[in-house]
Image (cartoon, rainbow, N blue to C red):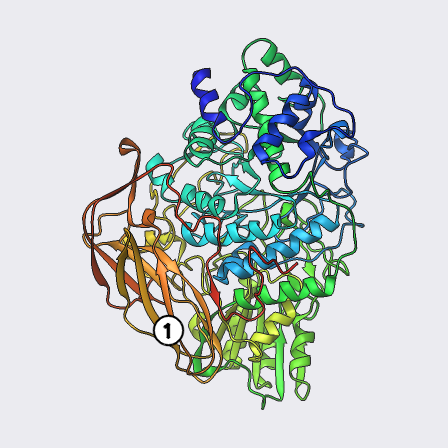
Amino acid sequence: MPHARLIAALMLGAACPATAAPPVHYAADARPWMNAALATPDRVRLLLAAMTQAEKLTLVTGWFGTDQPGDHFKADPLARYGSAGFVAGVPRLGIPPQWQSDAGVGVATQNVDREHPLERTSLPSGIALAASWNPRLAFTGGAMIGSEARASGFDVMLTGGVDLVRDPRGGRTFEYGGEDPLLAGTMVGAAVQGIESNHIVATIKHYAFNDQETGRTILDAIVDKDQARMSDLLAFQIALERSQAGSVMCSYQHLNGDYACEHDWLLTDVLKRDWGWQGFVMSDWGATHSTVKAANAGLDQETGYTDPAKPYFGAKLAAAIKAGQVPQARLDDMAGRILWSLFAKGVIDDPVAISPIDFAADAAVSRAAATEGAVLLRNEGDVLPIAATARRIAVIGGHADAGVLSGGGSAQVYPQGGNAVPGIAPTSWPGPIVYLPFSPMTAIQRNAPKAAVNFSAGTDPAAAAKLAKDSDVAVVFVTQWMAESQDFPVALSDEQNALVEAVAAANPRTVVVLETGGPVLMPWANKVAGILEAWYPGTSGGEAIADLLFGRANPSGRLPVTFMAGTDQLPRPVLDGIGLPETQPFTVDYAEGAAVGYKWFDKKGLAPAYPFGFGLSYTHFTMTPPKATLDRGELTIGFTVTNSGARAGMAVPQLYVGPADGGWEAPRRLGGFAKVALQPGQTRSLTLTVDPRLLARFDTAKGGWTRPAGTYRVWLGTSSRDLTTPIDVQLPARLLPVTYKPDHAGTSLPVMGSPGTSATPDNPAR
C-alpha cells in the first residue's frame, strides 16, 4: 500500500498529527490533556504532542503479564497477579499501565501457579449468553464481569468473541455469539457496552475468521470479500456499532494469503476507513509476524511477548521509522488510537483500583443469565417441570453431585472454592478441566425437600439404570469439554451415549441435561422425554438448572446455532488440517460464503436435528400476522404476541427476510428479533425495524450495499424453520454506501417486561 494512501486512511477518526511534533514538557499541575471537559480528539492531540518517541513506542509494545519460568521471563513488577498482558504507562504524563485480563465470561487467570489463581465470578459461556436472545441481559452480564475486572485492578478486558460459528467443532465455539451476524453482533456488542461502562477497555475478537483451532497459526482462510462483508465482518461491524469498543484483537490465521494481523484490507480499509472505527488494533498473543508490514497494514499494538529479542515493535519499529520504512505518522496514529481509547473509555480519568467484590450480587447476575440462556429442546408428555408429587428422583452422571462444567483455555475463570472435580486430564494447557463448585444435585434437593434424591456417578450404566427404574423421574447430566487451541468432535463420549440409552430404557421419564460448548449429536434424542441444553452455565449454574427443572423459572432460551443431524450436513464434513503435520500450512475454503449455519441448511434443503432459533417453553405464545410499513425508506414490521398459556413466560419472536426470487446466498436471513415477558393472557404490540443491510447484498464494485427494486418477503416465526406464511412487500432500489450506519447504532434492542434486566446502557445496574 502506498504510504500516502495508508496515512490518509489511518488518519480518519484518529485526530493525530500527520508529522511528529517535538515533545513538550509540562509540570505536574499543567497537563491540559487532563481536562475532561475537552473533546477526546483534542485531548489526544495535546497529549501526543507532549510525548517522546520512546514513550510512544512504549504504548505500542505489550508483554506477557505473568512470570514464565520455562522462558526465563520475569513480568514487570507493576503487572497484576494472574494477568495476561502488561503495557507500561507513562507516569509523568498521567498515562496508566494497561493491565490486561484474559476473559470471555469473567476475569480469567493466566498464571503458572494454578494452586493460587484469582477466584472470580463466571458468566455462562458466550454461546449461552447469545442463547438468551436478550441484549439487556448481555449488557448486565458484561457490566458485572467488567466490575470484577476493575476491582481486580485490570483496565483492559480481553473479551468480546464475535466470530461466527462456521464449524461447530471449533474449540472456541463456546466463547462466541452463534452463527448469525445480527444476533452475534447485537449480543456481543451489548456485553461489551456493559463491560466498558466500568471505565475499562474491552477487546472485540478475533478479527477475523478465527473459525477453527486446528492449524490456527498457519491456515489460510479463503473467502470471497463480498461474502465476508455479509457474514463474519457484518457481525463485527454490528458489534462495534453498538459498543464502540476501545480495542479489536486481530487473529492468528491468514486471510486470503496474508496474516490477519498484517492485512491492510482487513485492518485499514474495512475497519478503520469504511467503518470509521477510532480505537486500536492489538494482536493476539504472538500473532505479530513482522515490523514494517504489520505496522503499515494497521496493527497498532503487539502483545504477549516473553523474550526481549522477539518483539517486532519497540526497538525494531524505531529502526524501521528511522529508515523510512514506516512513516512517523503511522506511529503517531498507533499511539493516538490507544490514547483515544484510554480517554474515551475513562481509563485515564478514572484509574482502576483494587477493591472488594460483592460475590453474592454477581452470582445472582450469572444465575439470571444461565436461566435465560438454557434451551429446552424436548419435553414429551410434559415431563418438565418435575411434578411436586415426585418422591424419588435419580440424578445421574456429569459430576452433578459436585458442580457444573466450564470451558477451558484463556477463557477459564477459576471459581470461589476451587475446582470441584480436580485431576481430570488434561490438567495442563489448555486445561485444567474445571468444574465450578455449584452442585445441581444440591439445588435439586432444595427444590424437592420431600423427595428422595439419589445420585449415581454413571460410570456403571447397569447400576444407573436400576436407580432410574426405581425412580419417578431420572435426570441424566452429560458433558462435553471444549477449549482453545484444539478442536473437538460434535459428539458425547460413547460411554455417555450408552449411559443415556440404558437409563432411558429403564425409565421413560428420563430428562437429559446437556453441559456442552456447542451443538452435539444425540442418537438417543427420541428415546428420552426431555432435553435441556444448559451449555456451560457458570457460577450458580446448578441453581439455574434446578430452577428450570422444577418450574421456578420458565425456559426462554433459543438456539443461536443449528444442531445438525450429522457431520455430513456441514459444509466441510471432515475438518480441514486433521492428520497434517503441525507445521504444514493448509487452506480452508469457506466456499459457503455468507451461507453460514441455518442459511447453509436452508440453501441445501437439509433437515437439522434442531433449527436455529428453536426453543420450547412451559407456556404457549401466539402471534398475529405481520404488517409491513415503509417509513422514510426503512422497513418496519408490526405484530402482536400473546401468552395463550397458563404460565408466565418470555416469547422470542423472530423476523426473517429474503427476496421473493430467492436470489441471495440463502432463501432468508434473520432480520430482527425481540424478547418479551408476558403474564398468562397478556398481549403486547411490537414493532421491529429491519436493518436495510439485511435486505441487500454487498457489492464492492458498486461501493456498498445494493438492493434492487422488487418484491421481498417477510416471515414471522419462532425459529428459522417454524415460520408463518410470508407477506410480500415492494421495495425500491437502494444503494447504501460502505460507510453506512443505522440510526440505532450504539444502542441495545429493547426487552419488554423482562424480570431482572433493569440495566440499560444509560443506567447500568452496577
Badge 1: how crowded within 10 Å, few (<14), some, or many (20+)? many
| Total marks placed | 1
Q: Quadrant location of residue 27?
A: top right
Quadrant where the C terminus is found in the figure: bottom right
Q: For the point 45% across and 85% down, which residue is it?
A: 646
Relative to 39, residue 334 above or below: above
- Residue 398, x across and y down, in percent: 62, 66
Q: Amino acid at mark 1?
A: Val
Q: Is residue 140 left or right of residue 148?
A: left
Q: Residue furthest top?
A: 323
- Residue 23, x across and y down, in percent: 68, 17
- Res. 719 in view: no
Q: Is residue 339 left or right of residue 747?
A: right
* Residue at image mark 1: 641
Q: For the point 41% across and 52% down, which residue is it?
A: 182
Q: For the point 29% across and 43% down, which residue is it?
A: 697
Q: Quadrant location of residue 125?
A: bottom right
Q: Could you tell me which secondary element the residue under label 1 belongs to?
A: strand
Q: For the point 49% across and 40% down, which residue is it?
A: 210
- Res. 390 in view: yes
- Residue 543, x across and y down, in percent: 64, 71
